[in-house]
Amino acid sequence: MNNLISEYITTRICHDIIGNVGAVANAVELLEDGDMDFMEDIKSILKTSSTVLTARMKFFRLAFGLSNAGIEDTKNVENIIRAYLNTVGGKNPPELNFDVKNVNFNKPAMLLSMMIADLMVKGGTIHVVTQEGRLLVGVDENVRIVTEKAEQTKNIINGEQDSFVAQDAPTLYLSELCKNAGQKLSCTISPFVCFAVE
């Protein structure tokens, strides 16, 4: 299963950066053509794409990579999650309410933030908090989510799903991390989506 998780993670990361890599390549191509009429467009493309790529790569490095000093710094983790969330959701990216006290929950907090952002239709706040020794990550009841995706995510967590796609990478990886750490990962969907690690 670990090899499969690695394949899903690799596919997901490539999927999430390829569009902006392509945009940078197109901007470079326009520069090489030497047409100054497109200079403002080129600057805008390069600025936007580099911002997105930087935010996503920093996020993926900490969320899926080997643990390092960066994951121990809770404020750094919060800032990286915020920057990542600003790259999803178009004009209505998710907002973040972050109050994590235990550094051992930093990596799960990143993965759960990603998982919930995948479920959200547009806008809303993701709440990431520690409470009574648990990590809770959820959204308000009025936040619109894709119910079918939420059900699939819950099924994966409960071991009731045996076919996956690259978008399931954070769920699969976090489930494995929790299992190895002796932690319990759970999900509720009604009346609102909430994940817990304890």
Image: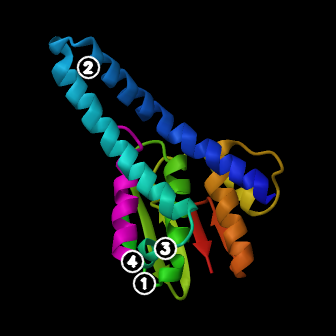
Q: Earlier in the sequence, mark 2 or mark 1?
A: 2
* Residue range (magenta): 73-95
Q: Earlier in the sequence, mark 2 or mark 4?
A: 2
Which residue is pictured at 72% across the width and 62% down the height? Answer: 157
Q: Amino acid at mark 3?
A: Asn
Please tell me whether mark 3 or mark 4 is closer to you in this view: 3
What residue sits right under mark 1 in the picture?
101
Report the disc number at residue 73: 4
Image-based side of 21 in relation to 189, left or right: left
Report the disc number at residue 5: none
Q: Amino acid at mark 1?
A: Lys
What residue sits right under mark 2 in the picture?
31
Q: Position of residue 127 (x, y in %)?
A: 43, 66
Residue 179 sits in which quadrant?
bottom right
Packing grade of label 4 (10 A; few <14, some 14-19, many >=20) is few
Nearer to me, 131 or 179: 179
Where's the C terminus, which quadrant? bottom right
What residue sits right under mark 3 in the picture?
68
Q: CA distance from mark 4 to mark 1?
A: 11 Å
Q: Earlier in the sequence, mark 2 or mark 3?
A: 2
Which residue is pictured at 69% across the width and 80% down the height? Answer: 181
Q: Amino acid at mark 4?
A: Asp
Please tell me whether mark 3 or mark 1 is closer to you in this view: 3
**In the depicted structure, whether residue 145 falls above or below residue 48:** below
Q: CA distance from mark 3 to mark 1?
A: 18 Å
